[in-house]
Image: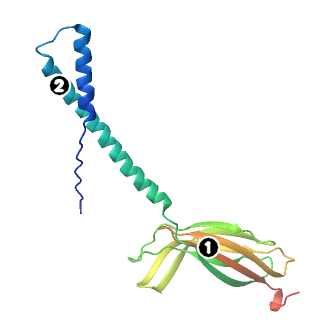
Amino acid sequence: MAVKKTIWLINTFDQDVVKETAAATCRKTGRINAAFPLSLQARRRQLEQRMRKFLVTTALAGSFGLHAAAAQTQPAPEAQMVERTVKAQPNKDTQIGLYINVRPDCTSGPLPTIRLATSPTSGKVVVKPGKVKATNYKACLALEVPAYVAFYKSPPDFVGDDTLTIEVKYPGGRTEIQKITVNVAGPGGQKI
């Protein structure tokens, strides 16, 4: 729906300026010109047009400026906090996250932005691009979409818990903070 705006400008300032300019011109020349009232009207129209342009430009700039300021001051949606625990073995790549964006029509949308907010103390995290094939995902019977896959790998001699935090920003402004605890156990699932 288009909104039609009408701006009414009432300006008495320009008439005073034009009258003063005309009086100053008469005083300088010392004569009254018969054609002067026409030039006075022409000057008045010219000044009114300039004032209208200025006021309309100012009103539009102010309007857009207010919209831009309102967009900047809107509070960002709060980040959703997620906590998970993943089991891993020392010195082996273990998948700790899979990030996709599937639209309602079962096509892929833009992938989220992923940032390592807090690094693990012992191991390291790597994100790799990949493809995900899925069946019966929401309304999608079968799909294949691009994805980001996050992997954790601990040093060969490390056993215990390692924590990290990943910030995931999805298109549309939704942010998710994932606190992941990786439980690294030796062969046979024993902690040393």
In this image, 187 relative to 94: left or right? right
- Secondary element under disc 2, as helix, strand or loop, is helix
Residue 61: mark in rendering: none
The amino acid type, in three-letter code, at marker 2 is: Ala
Residue 151 appears in which quarter of the rendering? bottom right
Sequence order check, earlier mark of 1 and 2: 2
The mark total stands at 2
Q: Position of residue 124 (x, y in %)?
A: 75, 70
Identify the residue position indicated by label 1 in the image.
149
Asked if residue 7 is positioned above or below residue 189 in the image, the reply reads: above
**Callout 1 environment at 10 Å: few (<14), some (14 to 19), or many (20+)?**
some
Of all residues, the one furthest to the left in this rendering is: 34
Residue 138 appears in which quarter of the rendering? bottom left
Residue appearing at x 44%, y 83% in the figure: 142
Residue 42: mark in rendering: 2
Q: Position of residue 164 (x, y in %)?
A: 72, 74
Q: Position of residue 11 (x, y in %)?
A: 25, 38
In the picture, the quarter occupied by the N terminus is bottom left
**Label 1 vs label 2: CA separation?**
72 Å
